[in-house]
Image: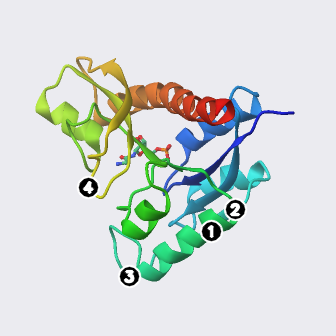
């Protein structure tokens, strides 16, 4: 019998390069996973186009009136979409809103995020810009479980990159993203392998 494929629900607000890296690894047959649905709070987000181009269900979820979180009705709809598509692991890939209890309680220890710094350093927005401004000589990215805090959940894995003389926020973020695109598929693959094995 074919091994179980871990069903992913991917949430993102932006261009979706981390999702693309994960989907590329799936499409190459490297991960025992499949993307059940991609959901964005931004109608024009590139992440939705990437999913649609590959024949993956992609949904825009109108977020409501708040800037940093979903309205309760939207969060309830999000949980419903993830449940009805049989999602087992929720993968935040550039999702720029806080996750609230309805979603946290529906997927305990089954929501992961990638953040562009070596947490606990530089939580929050534009972490690469914060790293550069602080004079840090190294930065990187972190995959962590999501909890109710901002980038505070238990750390699963990290990758380091150097901060180089002459870096701009853009060059540093680009270097961090190269590391993200290697780290995130690898971590998702580890979750998938555990699911397939057990
Ligand atoms: C990534 O660098 C990710 O780490 C960051 O947003 C970018 C999304 O890029 N996420 C956060 O800052 C979350 N706090 P992508 O849309 O190309 O994957």
Q: Label 3 vs label 1: CA separation?
A: 20 Å
User: Which residue is identified by label 2?
Assistant: 85
Q: Label 1 vs label 2: CA separation?
A: 6 Å
Q: Label 4 vs label 1: CA separation?
A: 23 Å
User: Which residue is identified by label 1?
Assistant: 81
Residue toward you, 42 or 98: 98
Mark 4 vs mark 2: which is more N-terminal? 2
Residues marked 4 and 2 touching at CB (< 8 Å): no
Image region (quadrant) for ligand 1: top left
Q: Quadrant of the N terminus?
A: top right
Residues marked 3 and 1 touching at CB (< 8 Å): no
Q: Residue furthest front?
A: 198
Q: Residue at x 45, y 25 (%)?
A: 179
- Residue neighbourhood size for the residue with mark 4, other residues' Cα within 10 Å, grouped as few (<14), some (14–19), many (≥20): few
Mark 3 vs mark 4: which is more N-terminal? 3
Whether residue 72 is visible? yes
Q: Position of residue 48 (x, y in %)?
A: 63, 57
Q: Residue at x 54, y 68 (%)?
A: 79
- SS for dot 4: loop
- Residue neighbourhood size for the residue with mark 1, other residues' Cα within 10 Å, grouped as few (<14), some (14–19), many (≥20): some
Q: Position of residue 136 (x, y in %)?
A: 16, 25
- The correct choice, above or below, for 180 with respect to 58 in the image is above
User: Which residue is identified by label 4?
Assistant: 149
User: Which residue is identified by label 3?
Assistant: 65
Confirm if mark 2 falls within 8 A of ligand 1: no
Q: Position of residue 40 (x, y in %)?
A: 55, 62
Q: Residue furthest right?
A: 1
Within the image, what quadrant is residue 172 found in? top left
Residues marked 4 and 1 touching at CB (< 8 Å): no
Left or right: 118, with 92 as reference point: left
Residues marked 1 and 2 touching at CB (< 8 Å): yes
Q: Label 3 vs label 4: CA separation?
A: 21 Å
């Amino acid at each position: 019998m074919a091994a179980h494929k871990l069903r992913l629900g991917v949430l993102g607000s932006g261009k979706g390069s981390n999702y693309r890296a994960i989907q590329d690894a799936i499409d190459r047959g490297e991960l025992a996973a499949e993307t059940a649905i991609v959901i964005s709070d931004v109608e024009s987000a590139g992440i939705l186009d990437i999913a649609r181009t590959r024949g993956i269900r992609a949904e825009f979820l109108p977020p409501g009136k708040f800037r940093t979180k979903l309205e309760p009705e939207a969060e309830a709809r999000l949980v419903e979409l993830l449940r009805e598509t049989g999602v087992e692991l929720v993968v935040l890939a550039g999702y720029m809103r806080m996750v609230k209890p309805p979603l946290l309680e529906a997927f305990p220890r089954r929501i992961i995020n990638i953040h562009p710094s070596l947490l606990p350093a530089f939580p929050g927005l534009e972490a690469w810009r914060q790293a550069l401004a602080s004079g840090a000589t190294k930065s990187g990215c972190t995959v962590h479980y999501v909890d109710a805090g901002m980038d505070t959940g238990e750390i699963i894995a990290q990758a380091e990159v150097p901060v180089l003389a002459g870096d701009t926020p853009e060059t540093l973020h680009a270097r961090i993203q190269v590391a993200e695109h290697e780290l995130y598929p690898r971590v998702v693959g580890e979750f998938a392998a555990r699911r397939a094995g057990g």
